[in-house]
Every structure is written in structure tokens, then in C-alpha cells.
Amino acid sequence: MIRILALLALLLPGLAQAQSWPIYENTYVNDYANLLEEDAETRVRRQLEVLREETGIEATVLTLFTRKGFEEAGSMETFATGLFNHWGIGDATRNDGILIMVLSEDREMRIELGSGYGAGFDREAQDVIDRVFLPAFQADDMQYGVEAGTDATLTRIARVFHAGEEPPNRANGPSGGSLFALFGALFAAFIGWKVFGRSIRDRFTRCPHCGHRGIHTDEEVLEAATTSAKGRGTRTTRCTSCGYHNSTSYVIPTRSRSSSSSFGGGSSSGGGASGRW
């Protein structure tokens, strides 16, 4: 019922105009712009669930077509901070929540950080956006960008913060020449992924039958996990060189019971970073 109300409020102009903020169906992924296929959404949600189980940090992904039509739209930065505080993302004492917001029609996004993060994490968020999210979005691969960007955000920001460490000082980072080479390598790798239609890992994995590098792996969710039961899926590997084909089953862990509950009451003072493409 919540999902129906959320979609109606987001899709019908009359309702959207009367609504100050988007509402959430659960505290992990609310893909109202339909950028993620079912299996991709499951993978993203599981990353967020594991982060919360292991660190207590609440991170959430929200996709919208546009922020226009909401009473509190304003600038993207103002909208993200207001929404973050309206939802109360993160622990109320640590203020360690993270909001990843992607607006597909507006062609803009933001990583909004709780007020517990220092300025170094703002710079790290900007680097994640510039190096991971935006190259994929500019290549019109929204799903890959959301998946890869979420993974980078959790690894480089949430888990580093939880460990009590500081992110690297980007001001003393690589020189312009080495940065150019790095961006070139990353771009080439991404284009390779796009052209061959498989992950970078698969491109360099050897076929167990003929030994050639470059296999293709697909995953299909057969039964989604719930809070009371594990899910299941099928992972299929094939080699285009020799025709090798193998299918195996895998188990999807049960979802955290807190996945559809409320956030912890955290707040943001406007920290984070933004990107446009």
C-alpha cells in the first residue's frame, strides 16, 4: 500500500504538487525512477543491509525522475539536505547516515552525508561522483552507475568512517599527468565493459574448460529474499571461445527486519557532494 501511495504521489502532478517530500517504502532502496532491474536492486539493497548489520550505518538510495513539483524543491543541495533531515537518516547520536540521490530527468545527483562526517569525506564523495557515478551516467548506463557508485560510496566513505579513519588527502594526490593516465585507464575499462557486455572481472577470468580469458556470467533471481526466508537464484557462466556452459544455484540471504521500518533520526548540515551530467 505504501508503494502504491508513493508512486501515485510521484507520478501524478496534482499529488506531487501537494507533497513536500518524497515518502519512502523502505530504508534501503526506493527506485522510483525505475533505473534498476530486479536483480540489480536486490544486489544494491543487500549491500546496504550488510553495511547496516556490520556497522550500524544507515545508507539509502533514492532515484526520482525529478525534484520539480515538490514544495521544498529549491536547489538540488537544499532539497537533498531537507529530505535527509525530514527522513532522519542515520543514527541520531553519531549522525552517520548517507543519502545517495539520483534524479534521472534532471540529470543531477548528490551524495548527502550526515553531520558527523568531516570535510575530508565531502572531497571523497566528490571523487566518487566524478570517477564512478558520472562516467556511467554519461554513457547512458544508469544501472551500472548506481550499482558501482553505491559500492564505492560504502567502501570509501561509510566503512572508512566506521573504522575511525580519515579518507586520503586528495589535495596531495597524483599529479595532473598521472591523473590523466588514470582517467584514461578507467574510461577504457568502462568502455570495454560496455562494448563486450560483461563485467571487468569476467573479461580477465579464465574459462575452466579451455583456459581462454573472457567469460560471461549472468545472474537471475528466482525467488527474492524476505525477512523470514532466504531467496534463491541461478548463476550461469559461459565461454564464447569453446562453448562451455555451466549453471549453479546460489542463496540470497534473508533481508533485515529493519528494511521497511523507520530511520534512526539522524541529521545533515549540508555536507556531501553533487554532480551533473
Image: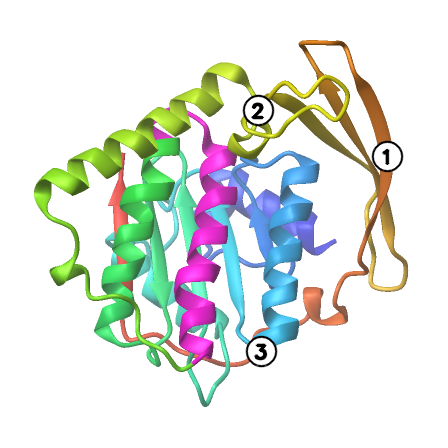
Residue type of the residue flagged with mark 3: Gly
Image location of residue 32, percent across then percent down: 55, 43
Most extreme residue toward the left is: 176
Nearest to N terminus: mark 3 or mark 1: 3
**Residue 95 seen in this snapshot:** yes
Q: Residue 88 bears which disc, if any?
A: none
Q: Which residues are magenta?
A: 137-163
The residue singled out by tag 1 in the image is 248
**Residue 20 seen in this snapshot:** no
CA gap between label 3 and label 1 equals: 33 Å
Nearer mark to the viewer, of 2 and 3: 2
Most extreme residue toward the right is: 229
**Left or right placement of residue 165 versus residue 8 in this view:** left
Q: Residue at x 30, y 43 (%)?
A: 131
In the picture, the quarter occupied by the C terminus is top left
Q: Residue 198 bears which disc, if any?
A: 2
Q: Residue at x 55, y 47 (%)?
A: 9
**Left or right placement of residue 155 versus residue 165 in this view:** right
Instruction: Say whether marks 2 and 3 touch (CB < 8 Å).
Output: no
Residue type of the residue flagged with mark 1: Thr
Which color mode does the image show? rainbow
The residue lying toward the viewer, choosing from 227 and 238, is: 238
Instruction: Give the quadrant of residue 123.
Output: bottom left
CA gap between label 2 and label 3 equals: 33 Å
Q: Residues within 10 Å of mark 1 (few under 14, many from 20)?
A: few
Image location of residue 59, percent across then percent down: 51, 65
Q: Residue 56 bears which disc, if any?
A: 3
